[in-house]
Every structure is written in C-alpha cells, then in structure tokens.
Amino acid sequence: MKTLVVYDIPDDRVRAKVFETCKDYGLAHIQYSAFFGPLNQNRRQELCQRLRRILGNKEGKIIICPICDKDLALMLEIAVPEEAVCRVAELSKKGPIIY
C-alpha cells in the first residue's frame, strides 16, 4: 500500500530529521513537506513511532496517510508550468503514470 506523509514543522532541525527519516524509509520527496511511496502496515507504524520521537514535544504536525491502489488510481494532479491542465494518474505496478 502506498503512503503519503505530509508535515508542517517550524523548527529547521526537527524538519530536517523528519525529511531524512522519510528518505531512509524509501519514500520519494514529492513536495516541500511531503513524501510518498510504498510502506506496509508494519513499516508505516514503525515510521510513525520514529517520527513521533523526533517531533517530541516540539511544535508541529505530521500526517501519515495510507492510500490503497483503488484510491490512488483516482488521483488528480495539477502541474504548472509543465502543463496548465488537470492530469489524471493511472496506477501501474511501479506507481502512478501521469498523462
């Protein structure tokens, strides 16, 4: 199952640790504070615990959202200036194919 991780963390050091941890889990950096990639339930729980320790009692928010293949196939993406159109993603075994 694919996983989307998004975060809003004002502390630069904490944000950098979250960034590196997401990369360590093989997630792709898709936006400034967003990562995406395949994680099974155990790895997702492990990542959640690790990110919780990193955030500690510092200000911030982290959202870890599993996305099933059925819902992923319905994903829409708007990308400018690459294309000023709404693109529909189709699921393949390697991930979404963007048209």
Image (cartoon, rainbow, N blue to C red):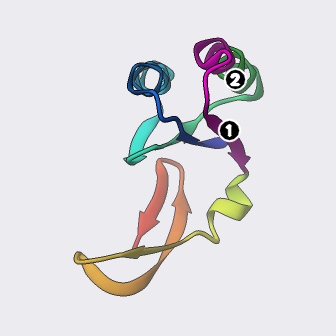
The foreground one among 55 and 57 is: 57
Q: Quadrant of residue 33?
A: top left
- Looking at the image, is 27 positioned above or below residue 58? below
**Of label 2 and label 1, which has the lower sequence position?**
2
Q: Residue at x 64, y 71 (%)?
A: 74
The percent coordinates of residue 59 (x first, y second) are: 61, 29
The percent coordinates of residue 20 (x first, y second) are: 41, 21
The foreground one among 69 and 3 is: 3
Tags 2 and 1 touching, CB below 8 Å: yes
Q: Secondary structure at mark 1?
A: strand
- Looking at the image, is 99 positioned above or below residue 43? below
The percent coordinates of residue 88 (x first, y second) are: 50, 77
Q: Quadrant of residue 62?
A: top right
Q: Quadrant of residue 55?
A: top right
Q: Look at the image and say whether residue 54 sits in the magenta stretch.
A: yes
In the image, farthest residue toward the left: 81
The quadrant in which the N terminus is found is top right
Q: Which residues are magenta?
A: 50-67
Q: Residue at x 68, y 19 (%)?
A: 52
Q: Secondary structure at mark 2?
A: helix
The percent coordinates of residue 25 (x first, y second) are: 51, 22
| Mark 1 Cα shell of 10 Å, populated few (<14), some (14-19), many (≥20) | some
Q: Residue at x 56, y 40 (%)?
A: 7
Give residue 35's mark: none
Q: CA distance from mark 2 to mark 1?
A: 7 Å
Give residue 64's mark: 1
Give residue 48's mark: 2
| Mark 2 Cα shell of 10 Å, populated few (<14), some (14-19), many (≥20) | some
Kind of residue at badge 2: Cys
